[in-house]
Amino acid sequence: MFSAGLLSRRSFLLNASTSAAAATLGSPSLSGAPFPAQSAESKQLPGDQDKVQLSQIHGPSEQDEKAPGSFLPDDKRIGYAIVGVGRLSINQILPAFGSSKYCRPVALVSGDREKALKIAAQYGIKESSIYDYRNYEQIASNPEVQAIYIVLPNGMHEEYVVRGAKTGKHILCEKPMANSSAEAERMIAACSKAGVKLMIAYRQQYEPKNRAIRKLVTSGKIGKLRGFLSTNSQQMGDPSHWRLKKSLAGGGCLPDVGIYCINASRFLSGEEPVSVSAQLWQPKDNPLFAEVEASVSFSMQFPSGYLATCTTSYDVHKSQSFRLEGTESWAELSPAYAYHGSKLRYSRLEEGKEVQVEPQIEDKDQFALEMDHFAQCIVQNREPHTPGEEGLQDHRIIEAIYEAARTGRVVSVTPPPKPTRGPEPSEEA
């Protein structure tokens, strides 16, 4: 089910060691709060007491330097158990701990123990902290684990979030949240009952260029929003891959890569759609798409008149971009939605002439940013920026899009009863 590819050895956490000697220094408590809980209004970040400030040496025309950090020492970092050691975990999530300020990997859950042993050796994870899917609940007695990161096929998310919540550990779950809104609702209820936090891994909402566009919107520099044009497409080639199995994926390109377009249109605008229309293509002569759709084109109508027009596909060469259009300006990312390398550009009028701006914003590891945000929420006992309700709303929109494609009609979407996003993440994360 999962990729058997292995990540080559690479440098790991700055100023941190996962040796047995370091482990004797102590671990965060089972409550997941290595420091006293802080209020949601607090500006203090974990480790700020050790932050090093450097003087500025450049002239007024140069950008200020910012020293990295603050970093938590190894024995104070939030320990993550990674559930599912497949392609995303090996290629992106585990390497991201090397850029993390507040987190460390301390446990693995895998159906392939041989592979898990190799990965554990690379990242200094104890052999005793490798679990399989049958003894997953034994994580409850591992004091090094405060957070569980679910990186499994979509159709397995509900089971492992519910089982994980019962261990008393906080849960970070990959997107899409599940296979349906009903599953998402049960996941939210299970975490609430267990008194643990649930966050959905919408990495783009923590990415600096996306956040810069959101600031352009909230500052009024884009003007009144009128349109969002986006595509997120790629070409699938392995007919045995779980993403092409409906029971595991919940659908085809729409819940996997199309969800990025849906979520970006909502996050960047701050609005919620009230109706959708759609067309779907599932070729009968291509065995790749025996169970799921190949392509979807859809539009979402918002109460202000803002309109999102999007395409997504599993049957074209990789194409990722979006443009947000307003009465005063436009802003775009191309490529968009990628793990790194996105390019931001926006327009503005200066002295009667249009000027296109390409701000220099440093790439940051999006997986490290989202994991660090969740660690802050655990330490400070506050709600994540992208809680379960954010994932639930996207599922409701996806279900409306499928219904619109099936019937050929415009389908209404019920706005959520309250905001689906929590407090904004720290800009210093």
Image (cartoon, rainbow, N blue to C red):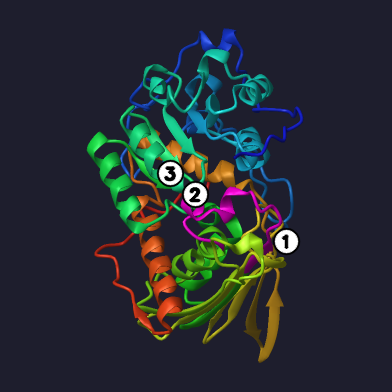
Q: Is residue 79 above or below residue 353?
A: above
Q: Give the range drawn in magenta.
A: 232-252
Q: Distance from label 3 to label 1 (Cα)?
A: 50 Å
Q: Is 244 colored magenta in this rendering?
A: yes
Image point 47% across, 76% down: which residue? 220
Tell me if residue 105 comes above or below residue 68 in the rendering.
Answer: above
Residue 17 in sight in this render: yes
Q: Helix, strand, or loop for circle 1?
A: loop
Amino acid marked by disc 1:
Ser
Q: Tell me residue 307's x, y (percent).
A: 47, 82
Q: In this view, does 375 lie above or below 267?
A: above
Q: Name the residue under label 1.
A: 61
In front: 265, or 212? 265
2 or 3: mark nearer the eye: 2
In this view, the residue farthest toward the front is 285
Q: Name the residue under label 3.
A: 157
